[in-house]
Structures are given as structure tokens and as C-alpha cells.
């Protein structure tokens, strides 16, 4: 999941129709190179969110399986705790992203046109 979050830096470069990368207006005004130049194009935002959701679901399924194995006595307590903590972290990340998206939507909805 960390790799998916790190790849979000690739979204700061926008692709124009002629295939060149646009830079921020401040960097083009002052003649300084933008910090995002040279960043390879990454995945789309939707695919990153989809991958993160799939990873979270996978972590929760793994934690559930490890919990059942722990109840049966087939798994070490440490493995069960690690799987459950990983699933909890994934769930907290998903909740935080959801809250940010809802907050952004509400701010946009409150804007005057």
C-alpha cells in the first residue's frame, strides 16, 4: 500500500494533447524547472484507489483467515495479531481517504458560482 501512496506523486504532472508535460504556472513564470519534471507517468487516480481498495480487502480476508486458524490452534498468536493489525491499518487508511473525499466534496458543494 505504501508503494501505491508513493506513486501518487506521478499525478502532479498533467499530460497535454501534444504529448508534452505542462508545468505549474509559477515555475514557468520564474523560469525555474518544476520539481515534477522527469517524473514518469503513473497509474490513473481511479486505478490507484482501486488497487488500494483491493489491497485492503485482501488484508481483511487474510486477517479473518488467520483469526480462524488461531481459533483452531493452527496459527501462532503473533501471526494472528500481525494480520489483524495490518487489516486495521488498511481499514483506517480507507476511512481517512473516504473522509477526505467527503470533505472535499462538501467544500466544492459550498462554493458560490
Image (cartoon, grey):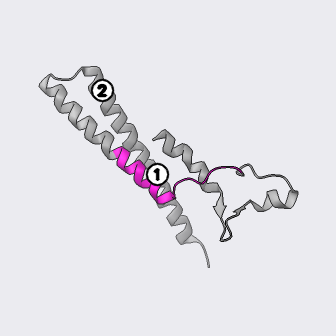
Q: Is residue 88 left or right of residue 68?
A: right
| Residue placed furthest toward the bottom | 113
Q: Judge left or right: residue 20 versus residue 102.
A: right
Query: x and y percent of residue 37 in the render?
Result: 72, 52
Q: Look at the magenta stretch and give its main secondary structure.
A: helix
Dot 2 or dot 1: first in sequence order is: 2
The circle on residue 81 is 2
Residue occupying image coordinates x 23% and y 31%: 66
As helix, strand or loop, the secondary structure at mark 2 comes to: helix
Task: Give above or below for 43 relative to 73.
Answer: below
Q: How many marks?
A: 2
**Along the line of sight, the residue nearer the viewer: 33 or 98:** 33
From the viewer's perspective, is residue 57 above or below residue 21? above
Estimate the x, y position of residue 100 in percent, counting from the top left.
Answer: 50, 55
Distance between the Cα atoms at labels 2 and 1?
24 Å
Quadrant, the C terminus = bottom right
Residue 12 location (% of width, % of height): 64, 55
Extent of the magenta region: 38-56
Residue at image location 70% in from the left, 63% down from the top:
20
Q: Nearer the viewer, residue 44 or 104?
A: 44
For the residue carrying disc 2, how many other residues have a C-alpha within 10 Å: few (<14), some (14-19), or many (20+)? some
Q: Which residue is mark 1?
A: 97
Residue occupying the point 53% across, 61% down: 104
Q: Nearer the viewer, residue 76 or 104?
A: 76
Amino acid at each position: 500500500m505504501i508503494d501505491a501512496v508513493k506513486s501518487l506523486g506521478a499525478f502532479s504532472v498533467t499530460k497535454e494533447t501534444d504529448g508534452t508535460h505542462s508545468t505549474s504556472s509559477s515555475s514557468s513564470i520564474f523560469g525555474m524547472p518544476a520539481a515534477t519534471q522527469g517524473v514518469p507517468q503513473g497509474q490513473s487516480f481511479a486505478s490507484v484507489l482501486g488497487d488500494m481498495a483491493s489491497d485492503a480487502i485482501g488484508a481483511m480476508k487474510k486477517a479473518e483467515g488467520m483469526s480462524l486458524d488461531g481459533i483452531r490452534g493452527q496459527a501462532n498468536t503473533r501471526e494472528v495479531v500481525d494480520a489483524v493489525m495490518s487489516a486495521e491499518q488498511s481499514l483506517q487508511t480507507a476511512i481517512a481517504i473516504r473522509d477526505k473525499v467527503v470533505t472535499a466534496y462538501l467544500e466544492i458543494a459550498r462554493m458560490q458560482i
